[in-house]
Image (cartoon, helix red, strand yellow):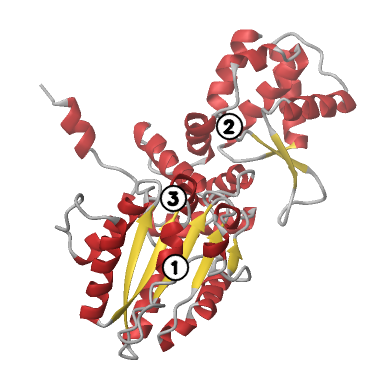
């Protein structure tokens, strides 16, 4: 008898290397985040002269905050080493270490993995940290990721202590630089003493990725994770369109991975828009039978025509002309008289407003001006089945 667990674990996949689809993967090149890396380099350039600096990096989820920090910090460490300056870099996740003692323990574990997790006060731990840095003749660069979690739970005492770390030392200066990362503004969470150690201009604010930026990010991961020709260009387009609403690169990469899984489950050798729609349906589906039941008969016929055309053509989009022709055929199949063009257009807008389809203007390569229709949330095959039941 075949072991179904081993069979699943060892079966082949069209994904060449799934590690490139992991959220923790740091690509060699960060699409559309070069300016932010330059800003960090300008901000922390004084560390190469043994002068501490502090900065804040904020932005919504999936905008590249952590990956920017994890790209920049090793480069800073290497640049300093070329000048015989030693910087120790530590990355602390404040959701996991939301108290001063836990955050400090994370820093000390960088120097001594066996450092005890009990028995030392915060001030004693700071003194141990000082000795570690003096012994190494090194600066310290700390990234506090999700810094708002630490500030909300423990206040800003640790931030203040670290930013003023060298003030009492006339000799053996051991500068500490901080980069705070957060989805939300952090200055309002600091007391006046801690706030005085930050320059409000040392703030880098990341906006959401726009559609074309998401396309480039997905295409980069496609080139890394899949053999050539496996992922259709239409599929990359559709992933970028779906993720545009949130501007979230993580969501786009998750869609790509799950589309690959959907293709594997169907034993197919390429990723087409149907697989992307399946991934979206699993990840964040807004299509429900209740909403379908609220549609009128000709709205259902219009939706059925779109789904049928997309399924048969295997494409991400269908133009309004082709959709209307298929609508006429679907009406015949259900013994209905097709409505006029104006009514068909109203049906399109109705089902768009209900959240079942998206409409966008055609771009390059299309003759004239037309609208392109997509099903972003659920596979066309599933739409066909559900609508057929209602019809």
Can residue 28 be seen here? The reply is: no
Instruction: Kindly check if marks 2 and 1 are in contact, taking CB atoms under 8 A apart as contact.
Output: no
Give neighbour class at mark 2: few <14, some 14-19, many 20+ (Cα, 10 Å): many
Q: Separation of disc 3 and disc 1 at Cα?
A: 14 Å
Q: Residue at x 38, y 66 (%)?
A: 142
Question: According to the image, label 1 marks what residue?
Answer: 178
Which comes sooner in the sequence, label 2 or label 1?
A: 1
Residue at the outermost left position: 1
Question: According to the image, label 2 marks what residue?
Answer: 377
Q: Taking 218 as reference, is 377 above or below it?
A: above
The quarter of the image holding the C terminus is top right
Q: Position of residue 249 (x, y in %)?
A: 52, 51
Q: Taking 220 as reference, is 256 above or below it?
A: above
Give neighbour class at mark 1: few <14, some 14-19, many 20+ (Cα, 10 Å): many
Can residue 311 be seen here? The reply is: yes
Q: Secondary structure at mark 1?
A: strand
Q: Position of residue 330 (x, y in %)?
A: 70, 18
Q: Please state if 63 lies on the left or on the right of 18 as rendered.
A: right
Q: Secondary structure at mark 3?
A: helix
Q: Residue at x 25, y 79 (%)?
A: 134
Q: Quadrant of residue 11?
A: top left
Instruction: Kindly check if marks 3 and 1 are in contact, taking CB atoms under 8 A apart as contact.
Output: no
Q: Taking 95 as reference, is 176 above or below it?
A: below
Q: Quadrant of residue 188?
A: bottom right
Question: According to the image, label 3 marks what residue?
Answer: 150
Q: Please state if 145 lies on the left or on the right of 114 as rendered.
A: right
Which comes sooner in the sequence, label 3 or label 2?
A: 3
Q: Position of residue 177 (x, y in %)?
A: 43, 72
Q: Nearer the viewer, residue 222 or 247?
A: 247
Of badges 2 and 1, the one in the foreground is 1
Q: Separation of disc 3 and disc 2 at Cα?
A: 37 Å
Which comes sooner in the sequence, label 3 or label 1?
A: 3
């Amino acid at each position: 008898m075949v072991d179904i667990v081993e069979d699943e674990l060892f079966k082949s996949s069209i994904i060449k290397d799934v590690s490139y689809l992991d959220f923790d993967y740091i690509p060699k090149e960060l699409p559309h985040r070069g300016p932010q890396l330059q800003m960090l380099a300008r901000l922390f350039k004084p560390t190469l002269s043994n002068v501490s600096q502090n900065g804040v990096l904020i932005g919504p989820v999936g905008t590249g905050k952590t990956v920017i920090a994890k790209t920049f910090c090793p480069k800073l460490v290497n640049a300093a080493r070329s000048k015989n300056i030693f910087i120790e870099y530590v990355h602390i996740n404040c959701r996991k270490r939301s108290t001063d003692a836990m955050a400090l323990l994370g820093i000390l574990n960088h120097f001594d993995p066996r450092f005890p997790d009990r028995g030392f006060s915060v001030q004693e731990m700071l003194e141990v940290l000082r000795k570690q840095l003096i012994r190494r003749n090194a600066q310290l660069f700390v990234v506090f990721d999700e810094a708002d979690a630490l500030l909300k739970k423990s206040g800003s005492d640790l931030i203040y202590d670290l930013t003023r770390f060298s003030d009492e030392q006339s000799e053996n200066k051991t500068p500490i630089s901080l980069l705070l990362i957060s989805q939300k503004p952090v200055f309002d969470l600091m007391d006046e003493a801690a706030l005085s150690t930050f320059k409000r201009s040392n703030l880098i604010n990341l906006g959401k990725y726009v559609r074309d930026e998401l396309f480039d990010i997905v295409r980069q991961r496609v080139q890394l994770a899949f053999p050539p020709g496996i992922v259709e260009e239409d599929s990359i387009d559709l992933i970028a369109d779906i993720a545009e609403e949130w501007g979230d690169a993580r969501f786009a990469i998750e869609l790509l991975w799950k589309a690959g899984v959907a293709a594997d489950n169907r034993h197919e050798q390429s990723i087409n828009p149907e697989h992307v729609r399946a991934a979206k349906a699993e990840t964040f589906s807004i299509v429900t039978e209740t909403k379908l039941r609220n549609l009128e008969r000709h709205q259902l016929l219009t939706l059925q025509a779109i789904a049928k055309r997309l399924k048969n053509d295997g494409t991400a989009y269908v133009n309004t002309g082709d959709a209307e022709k298929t609508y006429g055929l679907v009406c015949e199949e259900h013994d209905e008289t097709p409505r006029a063009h104006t009514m068909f257009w109203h049906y399109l807008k109705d089902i768009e407003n209900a959240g079942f389809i998206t409409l966008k203007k055609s771009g390059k390569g299309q003759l004239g001006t037309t609208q392109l229709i997509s099903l972003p949330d659920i596979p066309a095959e599933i739409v066909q089945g559900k609508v057929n039941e209602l019809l």
